[in-house]
Image (cartoon, grey):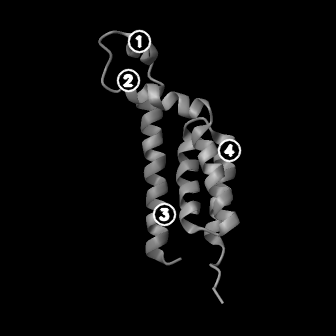
């Protein structure tokens, strides 16, 4: 992997981490967010919150990271490795630490292995 591709991967993972942090602290965890979203005149970000909460409640980001990481190691697929890192970063911020960290490690393993040469 050359420096440009490594930089793009790091930038993508950092962006996923930052978006997950913003979602956690601005949309999911504010005091009274559930009460505000239950009101008739709910803020515009409430549909996003209502869609996001079940995803991390049922380990969605962690499962996606784990599946992408397993596929990346099985097929030595770099794109799946990057997806595992991105979903793992979001999962670790949004309460899916166990599966998200395993998927991230599998993605890193797939990205650090030298590519296969076709014979």
According to the picture, the residue beneath numbered tag 4 turns out to be 99
Q: Quadrant of residue 115?
A: bottom right
Q: On the rendered structure, is 3 left or right of 89?
A: left
Residue 85 is tagged as none
> Which of disc 2 and disc 1 is earlier in sequence?
1
Q: Nearer the viewer, residue 116 or 106?
A: 116
| Inter-mark Cα distance, 2 to 4 | 27 Å
Asked whether, in this view, residue 97 is left or right of residue 38, the answer is: right
* SS state under label 1: helix
Percent position (x, y) of residue 71?
65, 60
Tag 1 residue: 38
Location of residue 17 with respect to 24 vertically, above or below: below
Q: Position of residue 100 (x, y in %)?
A: 63, 46
Label whose residue precedes the other's in the sequence (1 or 4) = 1
Distance of mark 1 from mark 2, alpha carbons? 9 Å
Name the residue nearer the viewer: 2 or 118: 118
Dot 1 or dot 3: first in sequence order is: 3
Task: Give the residue pinned by disc 3.
Answer: 9
Sequence-first disc among 3 and 4: 3
> Which label sits in the foreground, 1 or 3?
1
Which residue lies at the image location 60% right of the left edge and 68% below the top edge? 77
Residue 109 seen in render: no
Q: Using the numbered discs, state the Cα–Cα distance from disc 1 to disc 4 in whole angstroms.
A: 31 Å
Q: In the image, what residue occupies the spot 48% across and 25% down?
A: 29
The residue tagged 2 is 46
Q: How many marks?
A: 4
Which numbered disc, 2 or 4, marks the residue that appears first in the sequence? 2
């Amino acid at each position: 992997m050359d420096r440009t591709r490594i930089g793009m991967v790091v930038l993508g993972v950092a962006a996923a981490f930052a978006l997950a942090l913003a979602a956690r602290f601005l949309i999911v965890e504010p005091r009274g967010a559930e009460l505000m979203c239950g009101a008739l005149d709910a803020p515009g970000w409430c549909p996003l919150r209502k869609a996001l909460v079940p995803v991390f409640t049922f380990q969605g980001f962690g499962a996606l990271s784990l599946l992408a990481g397993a596929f990346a190691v099985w097929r030595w697929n770099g794109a799946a490795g990057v997806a595992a890192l991105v979903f793992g970063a979001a999962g670790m911020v949004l309460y899916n630490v166990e599966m998200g960290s395993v998927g991230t490690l599998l993605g890193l393993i797939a990205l650090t292995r030298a590519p296969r040469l076709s014979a």
